[in-house]
Image (cartoon, helix red, strand yellow):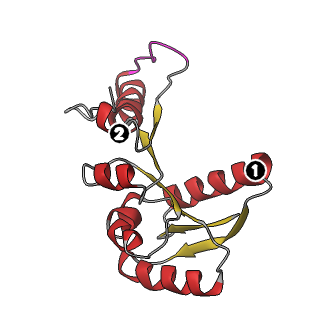
Amino acid sequence: SSTTGFHSGDSAGTSRETGFRDYLEQCRPDIGFKGTFRCSTGETPLIIREIIRKHTDLNGFYFAEFTQLFHNFHYLADLGRRYVVIGHEYADPYLSALQDGTITAILSQARVCQGYYPLKILYQYLITGENPSQEIYYSNVNIIIGSNAEYLKYSNNGCGFE
């Protein structure tokens, strides 16, 4: 088995891809990682086509950034072959792609809990001198697959799936 990763090169995408690759190397040495491709969203279909041509044993794609998968998942549906496709951050158009197997899994984080609250706590500490109310804060990561996608509802305030 082998997979490959896509992102545009920003630090979040690089960190996600590195973590994913490190996990595969440690826990699934039977899965090879063909490489990382940093490209614009518009270039992604061309790169995918070239990778598939060069690596006929390829069976998966990992998209470290939301926009890379969001703008290209329809292209993956038309390849004539199913690949394991893993991405980040859920969007409503993914529901049917998850259910029909075009997308295998989405790793969805609690955006407000990870983005808003840390900045709020930092602001309160630096500006008002208020210490955080607890030493450690945890945030959920949901793994969304075809069989659970319709049962998870994203909240209006962006705090994740409920």
- Magenta stretch, main secondary structure class: loop
Q: Which residues are magenta?
A: 129-135
Residue 134 falls inside the magenta stretch: yes
Which label is found at residue 28? 1
How many circles with numbers are drawn on the protein?
Answer: 2
| Image quarter of residue 102 | bottom left
Q: Residues within 10 Å of mark 1 (few under 14, many from 20)?
A: few
Nearer to us in this view, 39 or 28: 28
- Give the secondary structure at mark 2: helix
Q: Position of residue 28 (x, y in %)?
A: 75, 50
**Identity of the amino acid at label 2?**
Ala
User: Is residue 54 covered in magenta?
Assistant: no
- Can residue 152 be seen at all in this image of the molecule? no
Task: Give whichever of discs 1 and 2 has the lower sequence position.
Answer: 1
Residue nearer the viewer, 55 or 128: 55
> In the figure, residue 120 lies in which quadrant?
top left
- Quarter holding the N terminus is bottom right
